[in-house]
């Protein structure tokens, strides 16, 4: 069997040869090498991988800059080899040598790779592969922090509205991971980018695209109620502009959107420290709100719980 260094150099050379060799021949060499790498990293189905060898390969791949070649050449690769490469990527990023994830450290030093992967969501044939690779990266707080604070993060507000349902859903999945995987990182980010973030988020809440509206309000109803986001939630429910958006969503033709909007709306009403502007807006819309709440449909299996919450909110509005 070839040495670890030899295996990695063979992979590197095949990628470097892509621009110079005849297309099919060069791609076949890359495909063969990546397939072999996947077997070494994950085992051959009968025997598991040799963990010591896997660690050595991870170190060599970082030393030779092969992770950069993986990312830079993604657009040139076929579906099958991209699938193998994604498997290799996920295994490599999980390799810990002493106290460090060597491949994560490599990406920290080459953050342009993250930007490239995020931009590739625009390419329909690459989007789902890149989504898996990005989500593997953001399991690590330093890489999640980089994306949140980079210009690349802004692209997710566009991606969740893409007409391709699979890509838009995958982008939202990544978006959720960015905002839920690392509580302290997210808290710092939202505290310092509050206005910027919610201005963009408001646009997707009011999107003309039904799927975007439904997914974004559902996520907001979950996200704001997380204990780790209590400070952000308390700030959010002080603002009349956001209350008005929830009232608008309570009028949506979709039952699911109405229910998710209710779970955010009820926090505005239940807040014991409502500012004067919120109280005034609730009073001004009292008649319409009471009708909307009485007509609120229950989701399957949750009628009793929803009815109880709705009745409490109705009582609070009637007392204003």
Image (tube, helix red, strand yellow):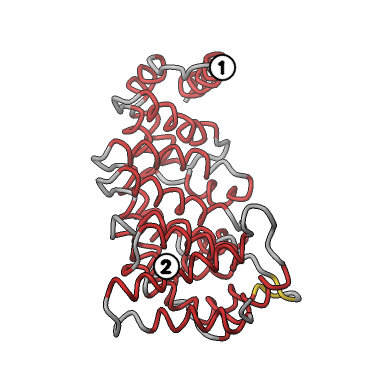
Q: Which one is nearer the viewer's eye here, 83 or 237?
A: 83
21 relative position to 269: left or right? left
- Element at badge 2? helix
Q: Position of residue 264 (x, y in %)?
A: 47, 35
Decide: is 201 above or below 76: above
Q: Which residue position holds label 1?
A: 308
Q: Which one is nearer the viewer's eye here, 154 or 14?
A: 14
Q: Nearer the viewer, mark 1 or mark 2?
A: 2
| Label 1 packing within 10 angstroms: few (<14), some (14-19), many (20+) | few
- Please report the residue visible at 54 percent of the width from the left and 60 percent of the height from the top: 136
- Please report the residue visible at 38 percent of the width from the left and 27 percent of the height from the top: 258
Q: Position of residue 113 (x, y in %)?
A: 43, 74
Q: Position of residue 24 (x, y in %)?
A: 29, 71
State the CA–CA distance, disc 1 to disc 2.
59 Å
Q: Which one is nearer the viewer's eye here, 18 or 274?
A: 18
Q: Which residue position holds label 2?
A: 31
Decide: is 145 above or below 247: below
Q: Which one is nearer the viewer's eye here, 13 or 177?
A: 13
- Give residue 49's quadrant in the image: bottom right
Q: Position of residue 249 (x, y in %)?
A: 34, 33
- Give residue 59's quadrant in the image: bottom right
- Element at badge 1? helix
């Amino acid at each position: 069997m070839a040495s670890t260094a030899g295996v990695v150099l063979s992979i590197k050379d095949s990628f470097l040869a892509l621009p110079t060799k005849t297309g099919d021949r060069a791609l076949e060499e890359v495909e063969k090498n990546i397939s072999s790498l996947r077997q070494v990293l994950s085992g051959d189905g009968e025997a598991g991988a040799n963990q010591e060898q896997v660690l050595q390969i991870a170190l060599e791949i970082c030393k030779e800059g092969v992770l950069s070649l993986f990312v830079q050449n993604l657009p040139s690769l076929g579906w099958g080899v991209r699938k193998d490469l994604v498997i290799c990527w996920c295994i490599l990023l999980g390799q810990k040598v002493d106290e460090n994830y060597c491949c994560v450290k490599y990406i920290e030093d080459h953050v342009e790779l993250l930007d490239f992967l995020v931009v590739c969501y625009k390419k329909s044939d690459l989007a789902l592969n890149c989504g898996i690779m990005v989500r593997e990266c953001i399991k690590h707080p330093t890489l999640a922090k980089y994306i949140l604070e980079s210009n690349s993060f802004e692209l997710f507000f566009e991606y969740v509205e893409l007409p391709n349902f699979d890509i838009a859903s995958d982008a939202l999945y990544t978006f959720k991971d960015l905002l839920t995987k690392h509580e302290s990182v997210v808290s710092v980010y939202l505290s310092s980018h509050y206005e910027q973030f919610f201005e963009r988020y408001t646009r997707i809440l009011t999107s003309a695209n039904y799927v975007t509206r439904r997914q974004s309000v559902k996520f907001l109803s979950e996200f704001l109620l997380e204990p780790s986001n209590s400070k952000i939630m308390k700030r959010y429910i002080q603002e009349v502009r956001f209350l008005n958006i929830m009232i608008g969503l309570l009028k949506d033709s979709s039952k699911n959107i109405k229910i998710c909007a209710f779970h955010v709306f009820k926090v505005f009403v239940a807040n014991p420290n409502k500012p004067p502007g919120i109280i005034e807006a609730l009073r001004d819309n009292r008649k319409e709100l009471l009708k909307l709440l009485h007509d609120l449909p229950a989701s399957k299996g949750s009628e009793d719980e929803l009815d109880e919450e709705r009745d409490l909110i109705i009582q609070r509005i009637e007392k204003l």
